[in-house]
Image (cartoon, rainbow, N blue to C red):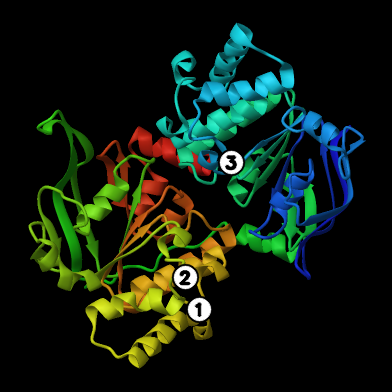
Amino acid sequence: MNVLEIRNLKVDFRQGGHVSPAVRGIDLAVKKGETVAIVGESGSGKSVTALSTVSLLAGTAEVSGSVLYNGEEMVGADETTLRRIRGNDISFIFQEPMTSLNPLHILEKQLGESLTLHQGLKGKERDDKIVDLLRKVGIPEPELRKKSYPHELSGGQRQRVMIAMALANGPDLLIADEPTTALDVTIEAQILDLLMDLKRTEDMSLLFITHDLGVVRRIADRVVVMKDGLVVETGPTAQLFDAPSHPYTKMLIEADTIGAPKPVLDQADVLVETEDLRVWFPIKRGLLRRTVGHIKAVNQASLTVREGETLGLVGESGSGKTSLALAVMRLIESKNRITFQGQDIHAFNRKAMRPLRKDMQIVFQDPFGSLSPRMSVAEIIAEGLVIHTDLSKDQQRDAVADILTEVELDPDVMDRYPHEFSGGQRQRIAIARAMILRPKLVVLDEPTSALDRTVQAQIVDLLRDLQQKYQLGYLFISHDLKVVRALSHKVMVMKNGDIVEAGPAQQIFEAPQHPYTQTLLKAAFGS
């Protein structure tokens, strides 16, 4: 029996006189107790399809076709019917819980609203149900935690709260839209295990939207592959991975395996070296702001990066990866020696560091957040040239055109703004900004985690090519161990500010020694 049946669904978005087709006549079904994964790149129509099920799209959307929930038509249904189904029979979990949870209300209030609205629960009965839900999704000390605000929880805990809210009214169908993309690999594994356990115990069906094929292999009974608003292939998970028939499906699967780095030259010079580097942030209290303790972000970190070499820094959020990288770049205070191109820069002040800044650059995780929306691409990329060189305006534009070509973007786009580009194109712009000064060392802080797998593969190839061409040293921070493996010559594993294991990438991935490293690899690769 089908819980959800979609027939010839079409969704167009009308803006003025312009019509943009998002979904172009798809068929899809979810059986009772089944997990169906919808996969595809950004813009393929995955989320629009999911939101269409209970008419959650914006007013500019024009929907036609049929969406049947347990035989009841949802397309064109009246608001009373839709309100009865939404959150009650069909529930949603979204990608970023911090934007879905109200920052001004405690968890108890947010969970309680749904229980009161849909089930009429009040007082002690409602409070007991809230505690039970939080306990069911693995929130520790739920009696205390229900009084917390969203910002007081970790990313994984916030996602667990979102799952609790989705489960509050015992839905038949749970729709999860990229619920693990922003999470560390170990937290992702916990959330996936939780969802599968809850699906069994609560007797639910699951429609799971993702671009991560590793997740699909792990949880899905059946897969639906979407491209440009169409279903291009569908079938049982094992069959689809073992014998994909559509070229696009084959491309997605191939993009999940993205090669290995080129070897480092034997004669490569050391670029940067640290010895027992320590980053402790003081905790100050009282009227006189006395130091009463420290947040120990990094303890005794010793590392070496040579020309043309990538050191991968892995570990969960809060392990100290980014603090270590920022200390190496002298962007935060630290203790003990940092040597850059033979100079001990540990005691350098801002003025002394300024001439070295062109040789040390950084690429951030979210290009949309790190690129100014008020500056054109040319202004963004040329900013370093304005500060560090005496080039004329024409020479700057020529340099911008050259670097855009190098990162495989058309130089004609230089007068456009960041919002006019896709995520992958924006990340290429961020890389161009870092590379235009021909740096020696580049910190890559989660530069691919917000991107689709196919775009990730393109960015990894680009970074490898640039490294080989200019013998760049990379400090690569990521929780995606597949990408770390594709880029890194050496790996350091961090936990709570300590380096628990370090060595050649092949050794770390094939024969991990520390239990924490083994846990990370098992969560990432399932073995």
Task: State the SS at label 1.
Answer: loop
Q: Residue 162 at what x, y percent from top left?
A: 58, 32
Numbered circle sitting on residue 179: 3
Q: Residues within 10 Å of mark 1 (few under 14, many from 20)?
A: some
Disc 2 vs disc 3: Cβ atoms closer than 8 Å? no
Q: Residue furthest top?
A: 124
Q: CA distance from mark 2 to mark 3?
A: 26 Å
Mark 2 and mark 1 lie on one chain; the one further toward the N terminus is 1
Q: Which residue is mark 1?
A: 408
Mark 1 and mark 3 lie on one chain; the one further toward the N terminus is 3
Residue drawn at point x = 54 percent, y = 30 percent: 160
Task: State the SS at label 3.
Answer: loop
Q: Residue 181 at what x, y percent from top left?
A: 54, 46
Q: Which residue is mark 2?
A: 428
Residue drawn at point x = 30 percent, y = 74 percent: 471
Q: Residue 49 at what x, y percent from top left?
A: 76, 50
